Image: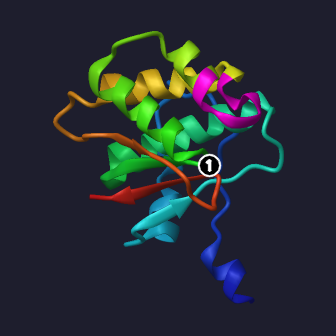
Amino acid sequence: MTVAATMLAPLATTVIEPDAPVEDLAPLRGLIDDAKVVAIGESAHYVPEFHLARHRLLRFLVERMGFATYALEAPFTAGRAIDRWIASGIGEISAIADAAMPIRLGRIPQLPETLRWMRASRGSASSVLMCRDRVVLSCRCSRR
């Protein structure tokens, strides 16, 4: 058996809805272990299902594994503008994301939904979320 085969555990789920319970993602805990950074990429930017699955994975990382930072592949100013919105709620996130994100990524309806969840989650006892910017990978979360 290869190293990759021993590290990868198939998930017995096809659920991608962001609000679905995340217990079925528990096998990822063993793969992630004590990692400080988890990268979540996609093969195409404009596929809604990838964004829905990313949102659900983000929930698992935050709610079950204690991650607290979400970094976007975006210019510095985009991360700052979105982080200000997450902290304050001032303005309309769809318009902010549309103006801030490159190649019209802010127009993908699933991105503002994820950011709204991040804003709503800031007040919970389990997490304080921040949005950061300019990473090589599509998205990453790091533990506090």
Residue 16: quarter of image: top right
Name the residue at 60% across, 45% down: 74
Q: Nearer the viewer, residue 104 or 51?
A: 104
- The crowding category of the residue bearing disc 1, from other C-alpha atoms within 10 Å (few below 14, some 14 to 19, many at least 20), is some
Q: Is residue 100 magenta?
A: yes
Does the rendering let one see residue 15?
Answer: no
Q: Name the image quarter holding the N terminus.
A: bottom right
Residue 121 vertical position relative to residue 77 in the rendered view, above or below: above
- Whether residue 91 sits left or right of residue 52 in the image: it is left
- Whether residue 50 sits left or right of residue 71 in the image: it is right
Residue 84 vertical position relative to residue 38 in the rendered view, above or below: above
Q: Name the image quarter holding the C terminus.
A: bottom left
Name the residue at 64% across, 81% down: 6
Residue type, numbered disc 1:
Glu
Q: Is residue 105 magenta?
A: yes
Q: Which residues are magenta?
A: 99-106
